[in-house]
Image (spheres, rainbow, N blue to C red):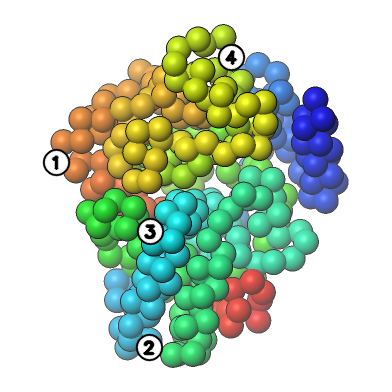
Amino acid sequence: MAIQQQLAALVVTLLALLGPAACQDASNGCLGRWQRGTAQGPLQPCPRIQSPAPVLRLSGLSVGYYSSSCPGAEEMVRKAVAEAVGSDPGVGAGLIRLFFHDCFVRGCDASVLLNSPDAERFGLPNLSLRGYEVIDAAKTALQTACPNKVSCADIIAFAARDATYLLTNNKTFFDVPAGRYDGRVSFANETLPNLPGPFSDLQDLKDSFASKGLSTSDMVTLSGAHSIGRAQCRFFLDRFAGRTDAFAESLRAKCNGNDGTMVAQDYVTPDFLDSQYFKNVDKYVLFTSDAVLNSTDTMGLVTDYASNNQGLWEGKFAKAMVKMGYIGVKTSADGEIRAECSKVN
């Protein structure tokens, strides 16, 4: 009870910090994606605060963008990622998640990295994000080699690609088109309306991805990232109430009444990014948003990926990551190349 009261107090405090817009979003069901017990019945339509360019901008980026202006840029990012993931694979999962959370709010513009009291990183869905120190390490190296040339937005995209490569046991590598500029604004109250959460139902997931120019197939494919990383018990344990099978019992034992306990999202291959996630749907995944993929219009693709036919999912995941990287891309007209990723110039 004490933990639940502390969590409730935290949510109230966060909403106060986020301001009236966040409270309005919560009353319309947005908070129900991220906090159990706040949504009554099915999630209600969630009004979305869109970025200035929320959908795909399929131009302006290119592979090898820094080959002349900063040769070796991608290798410097790769080195920072390899050092971090080698010590803790969970950081790799964090970098992939960081890319997703950045792109879904105001586009892929590194707005998630800005560090001010009302910025995205302090929105409720982003409080557990990891990998900031890896981006900073890469940026420091790049600023030394070629000052003010490589955007923080591109560093995030490169880092997510490199984390994917390492976590798939060096099986999945893809070229990342670059040339993004960094955004100048970041608001915590835009996170809840734009980021689907662990309690999202299938329609909410479809709507959320469609609003960014991504298809249902892209949504299913990118959900496979949940084969790596850990989740807090507060986000899934209620889903297993009443279940008495060995898996449910093991989760209750691991959580042991503590909402903040972290549990591996994939109990079979917890340190690898692979298609095991799709074999786990729906009985052995943690989140409601994962279990709902066991639906008529998504289960066919889930089954295909579960078969792991010649790396089918890995190839599709690479393409979906590249596609996601085009969401809301900034240019020199509406962005900048930050000298420090945590603050605007």
Give 335 or 88, whichever is nearer the viewer: 88
Mark 2 vs mark 1: in front: 1
Where does the image place residue 34, in percent across and percent down from the top left? 64, 35
Circle number at residue 310: 1
Mark 3 vs mark 2: in front: 3
Type of residue at label 3? Ala
Dot 2 or dot 1: first in sequence order is 2
In contact (CB < 8 Å): disc 2 and disc 1:
no
Estimate the spatial distance between the alpha carbons at disc 2 and disc 1, rounded to whole Å: 38 Å
Name the image quarter holding residue 76.
bottom left
Estimate the spatial distance between the alpha carbons at disc 3 and disc 4, rounded to whole Å: 34 Å
In contact (CB < 8 Å): disc 4 and disc 1:
no
Dot 4 or dot 2: first in sequence order is 2
Residue under numbered circle 2:
69
Name the residue at 27% across, 60% down: 174
Name the residue at 56% across, 24% down: 253
Residue under numbered circle 4:
241
Residue under numbered circle 3:
163
| Horizontal relation, residue 308 to residue 341: left or right | left
Dot 3 or dot 2: first in sequence order is 2
Type of residue at label 4? Ala
Dot 3 or dot 1: first in sequence order is 3
Circle number at residue 162: none
Name the residue at 37% across, 88% down: 69
Q: Secondary structure at mark 4?
A: loop
Name the image quarter holding residue 176.
bottom left
Type of residue at label 1? Gln
Where does the image place residue 89, in percent across and percent down from the top left? 42, 54
Mark 4 vs mark 2: in front: 4
Where does the image place residue 94, in percent across and percent down from the top left? 50, 53
